[in-house]
Image: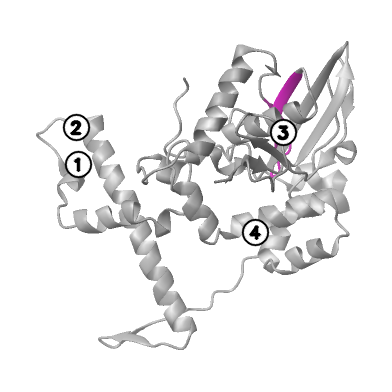
Amino acid sequence: MKRRMSSLPLAALCPQAPVLSEKHASGRSAAMSTAFHAYCADPDADDVKDLLRNLSDEERAALEDWQKPSPIELPAGPTLRYEHAEREFAVALDRHGQACDPDDPDCLTAGHPDAAWVFDRDGSRYAYVLDLKRSRWTASPDSLQIRAYAYAVGVEHDCDVVVPGVWDLENGGYDWGQPIRMASDEAISLWFEIRAAASHDGQAITGPHCTAAPCWGRMHCPEHLLPAALAAVDQSPLTVVAEDGDELTADKIVKALELVKPLEDILKAVKDKAKAYVRLGGVIEKDGWQYGPVVKIGRESVSVKRVREVCPDLADRLITRGKSYEEYRWKKTKK
């Protein structure tokens, strides 16, 4: 069983998450990300043009605001330039932690880092390994995916030190993780973590990670959806919203949240099926009402990147940034 490095963070939590995510289609964000990654690697390639054509006008407009990694000068040198990096390449590890071909029968895990710079400095070999993410909130350099990329590059190039990093496509900016010395207890511990996640097997394990990680295959996971459908009869966890006399506790809220999210996913799945039925010519009517699409006029929009290119002198006067806001969601606690 070969597992993608991009699936390792979820695989460590649920062995069925990577299976479902690879088996079933991903969302539009994944299509946008794939197109932009390919564009950054080789904008003139024929397959890149096809990927861009398969996006909607709105999605292509959004990509115009995404930013390629800018040059960055390291404190002790050198300057890392994206065009000089090794880009969109394959790395793989076998069951002994050695570099191998992704098609090797003994391959345990394989992946495709977006960029890497390998260089020698002061008698040591370094590798800075970068992944392009839609925003810095999508993943951190501490993610097992990014650290696995860095570890694999370090093994393949016989590096002394590897540094995992993330580039924020929407806002620009690097987020570098802590350097990892390949001949250290930390690197050994990282390999054991990679091997455990890549080898994790068994039944699905549900929890906050289903939606917080998130697991893109959860809409096809019986363990995630079915319990919610059955529990809908017993709505006792939802009484948390109406409690007055009883003490409100975190445990009660957790039970309510764990029930509500799968129910939301079931509702989405039902609506998606209804939309598909109508698109295929089906008619849904009840009591004089018909379910179907209503055409909405598209909103006017402006590309921030285009404004800065066309009228740079006015850009700072025309472009405003919205206020920061809070988003409540599950997030992994620090160790």
Q: Is residue 61 above or below residue 288?
A: above
| Quadrant housing residue 328 | top left
The residue identified by callout 3 is 99
Where is residue 118 shown, x and y percent of the image?
Answer: 84, 28
CA gap between label 3 and label 4 equals 29 Å
The residue identified by callout 4 is 31
Magenta residues (range): 161-176
Label 4: how many residues lie within 10 Å, few (<14), some (14-19) or many (20+)? some
Three-letter residue code for mark 1: Val
Label 2: how many residues lie within 10 Å, few (<14), some (14-19) or many (20+)? few
| Quadrant housing residue 93 | top right
The residue identified by callout 1 is 240
Q: Secondary structure at mark 3?
A: loop
Compare marks 3 and 4 and give the one earlier in the sequence. 4
Compare marks 3 and 2 and give the one earlier in the sequence. 3
> Given contact means CB atoms under 8 Å apart, are the residues at marks 3 and 4 in contact?
no
CA gap between label 1 and label 3 equals 52 Å
Q: Of all residues shown, which one is farthest toward the left?
A: 245
Three-letter residue code for mark 3: Ala
Task: Tell me if residue 330 can be seen.
Answer: yes
Queried whether the magenta region covers residue 169, the answer comes back as: yes
The residue identified by callout 2 is 248
Three-letter residue code for mark 2: Leu
Q: Is residue 37 above or below residue 273?
A: above
